[in-house]
Amino acid sequence: MAQNKKTEFPKTAQRISSFTKLLSHPARLAILEVLAKRQSCICGEIVEILPLAQSTVSQHLKELKEGGLVKGDVEGTSSCYCIHWENFSKAFDEFSKYIEFITTFKNNKDVNCCE
């Protein structure tokens, strides 16, 4: 059986990878956009806005919630979700700093790749 080597990488890389994976599906991006515009939203309202089935929206919301980018409560038969801004901001800042770090190497004169 193959082993998962993810834990062999630095914790920062693992967190950035998880964050970008959450953003890697257009449906999750659309859900985040709806939540950002409305400040909070009942799951059924998201289904009315997006061209997705209730079960698909629920699955994406579950992934966003498990990843810490969204928080929500069940209220009777409906669920209310909103962006977890503190977690989102931390993840975005960490990702931005990493991209800035990577781009510091683009002008490295010692690299002669694909030229």
Image (tube, grey):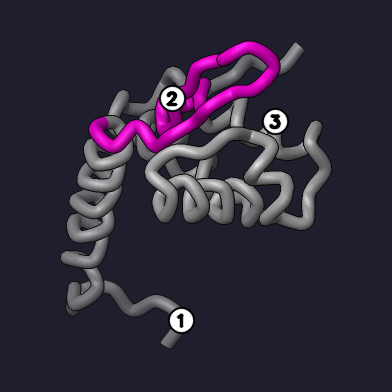
* Within-10-Å neighbours for mark 3: few <14, some 14–19, many 20+: some
| Residue 33 locus on image (x, y percent) | 48, 55
Q: Which mark is residue 114?
A: 1
Mark toward the start of the polypeptide (2 vs 1) = 2
Name the residue tied to disc 3.
58
Residue count near mark 2 (Cα–Cα under 10 Å), binned few <14, some 14–19, many ≥20 = some
Residue ranking furthest to the bottom: 115
Amino acid identity at mark 2: Lys
Residue 114 part of the magenta-drawn span = no
Q: Which residue is mark 2?
A: 71
Extreme-front residue of the structure:
76
- Secondary structure found at label 2: strand
Q: Is residue 24 left or right of residue 37?
A: right
Specify which label sits upstream in the sequence, 3 or 2: 3
Q: Which residues are magenta?
A: 65-86
Q: Amino acid at mark 1?
A: Cys
